[in-house]
Amino acid sequence: METGMDSIERFEYDVLVLGAGGAGLRAAIGAAQDGVRVAVICKSLLGKAHTVMAEGGVAAAMGNVDPADGWQTHFYDTMRSGHFINNYRTAEIFAKEAPDRVFELESWGALFDRTPEGKIMQRPFGAHTFRRLCHVGDRTGLELIRTLQYKGIHCGIDIFQEVTTTRLLKDGERVAGAIGYERESGRFLLWRAKAVVLATGGWGKVYKVTSNSWESTGDGAAIAYRADAELQDMEMVQFHPTGMVWPPGVRGILVTEGVRGEGGILVNAEGRRFMQDYDPKRMELSSRDVVARSIHKEVQAGRGTPHGGAWLDITHRGAEFIRRKLPNMYDQFLHLADIDITKTKFEVAPTIHYTMGGVRADPETCATNVPGLFAAGEVACGLHGANRLGGNSLSDLLVFGRRAGEAAREYAMGLTVLPGVDDGEVRLEQERVLRPFAVEAGENPYQLHAELQQVMGEHAGIARDGASLQAGLDKIMALQERAGRIGVSGSRMYNPGWHTALDVGNMLLLCEAIFRGALAREESRGAQWRTDHPDELEDFGRINFVEYRDGDTMRLKTYPVSPMPPELAALFASDVAPGLATAPAVGPAAGGRE
């Protein structure tokens, strides 16, 4: 460590991990072997990553409850839910390795709910053929983070907390490190590294009604794009069917799919269980895109609840069962909405939840198109396609966090010296980051954030059409121009306006990518519902849309979806999922469907 030019504190590591959620921590554990020096940078505090808000469970075909389940069925469900624009190899690796990652987590101290025989309990979830989600009540993400952070700190990794990373540094074409600043003091920090792993999560805060926490502003995807990484499937933004609706201060907070997995039913204002009209086979446990659209359609038809949603009812399961299986949900509604879900139904509506698109990453190594840069978790693209299955996110973190960390370690060990850093590039980045302080009577960053959220909600919501998307893109481009004149006052210490100014720049870039992808995909597929192009078209099922940087201009191109080999394609020869034809019938949960 040294203190040098312009009071920048400098560090040197072999592998730098950006993000301390599940993917980042698992990557750091995978990298921190064979004497490899690893640092983790997190925007918030260790243990506060968005992963802790994941509730329902970790999807893995372990067959503890339904013995007929296997990796082939999990692969089948993942590809069908993604409407076949997922990378088949990514999904294959994922389905095969998820059980081992759960067992590994257990060996590190994770405490899962148990079957009477002592096996890890698995619950049903939307669009999963079998009961597959390993869970800890409805606090699974918290247990995952607790376990990984204890394992990680015992691997000798260094942690930089409450730091915003603003730029990836490069030596020629390859990654050379990163620059950022401490959010408390505003002091600049620079890390030279042989390899960088992006694990920074999504960008749900581009929408006003969202289940995402404050950190989810897309920093990782934005700085990767500026470093010439490719972004893929950006039009695919997941609306979780069930967010809180009332009171207004809690609108968008997640209501876990576990409520429906444990037997909760959806009814409209007329008391009708409306999912029987949209998916009579799977009903409430249909895929998230289908359930979210169904609630939207009921509201549009005038059958919504008083505050614009649907009723979710789990009272028939009994108070003791609800408090035991869904303790977070019970507490959340009791303390935030003064509602006892053991006694009454409650209102839910779709909320922005997850971004299927992200940095294009290799299935085997999680490498991006930028040498030395790897990506895992929500910031990466390839696994989920047009729609993510519930529970696949947590196992995604484990499977590809490990692969990214190990690949970054191998890459770093292949380099004998650290890549160089251009001090001129560093000075330019400092000037860019500090520019808002020099603008007098500039644009208000909070106002711009509110306006971009308004644009996304109005023009890039559940239902989209070409004219509205183009109008939204025009507004985002105008906001980008205004963002160049953002001004902030005060010092660099404890200055949330300054932080927001930088976040807005990242979010506006990703908003542009969402609109450009959504305009180009003239069909309805998964999360992309174009009312002017309502059909899912075969030709669009063969391509992924990719955004890339051309100077200061965002360009769009396509890559062909890799065809599955015959042995995997054969799994889709019929509409019956692998293992289902020979599996014993599974009875419904009381009042619901398994």
Image: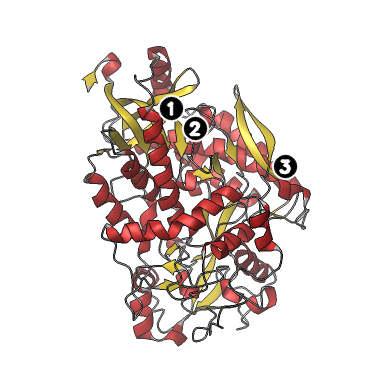
Asked where in the image residue 322 lies, by quadrant, the reply is: bottom left
User: In which quadrant will I find the N terminus?
Assistant: top left
Q: Residues within 10 Å of mark 3 (few under 14, many from 20)?
A: some
The CA distance from mark 3 to mark 1 is 29 Å
56 or 352: nearer the viewer: 56
Q: Which of the two labelled residues, at mark 3 and mark 1, occupies the earlier sequence position?
A: 1
Q: How crowded is mark 2: few (under 14 residues within 10 Å), some or many (20 or more)?
A: many
In the picture of the structure, the residue carrying the numbered disc 2 is: 224
Residue at disc 3, secondary structure = helix
Residue 581 in sight: yes
In the picture of the structure, the residue carrying the numbered disc 1 is: 168
Check contact, mark 2 vs mark 1: CB within 8 A.
Answer: yes
Residue 288, given in percent of the width and then of the height, sits at 58, 64
Q: Which of the two labelled residues, at mark 2 and mark 3, occupies the earlier sequence position?
A: 2
Q: Which of the two labelled residues, at mark 2 and mark 1, occupies the earlier sequence position?
A: 1
399 or 177: nearer the viewer: 399
Residue 388, given in percent of the width and then of the height, sits at 55, 57
For residue 520, which numbered disc appears in the image?
3
Residue 393 in sight: no
Question: Hey, what amino acid is under mark 1?
Answer: Leu
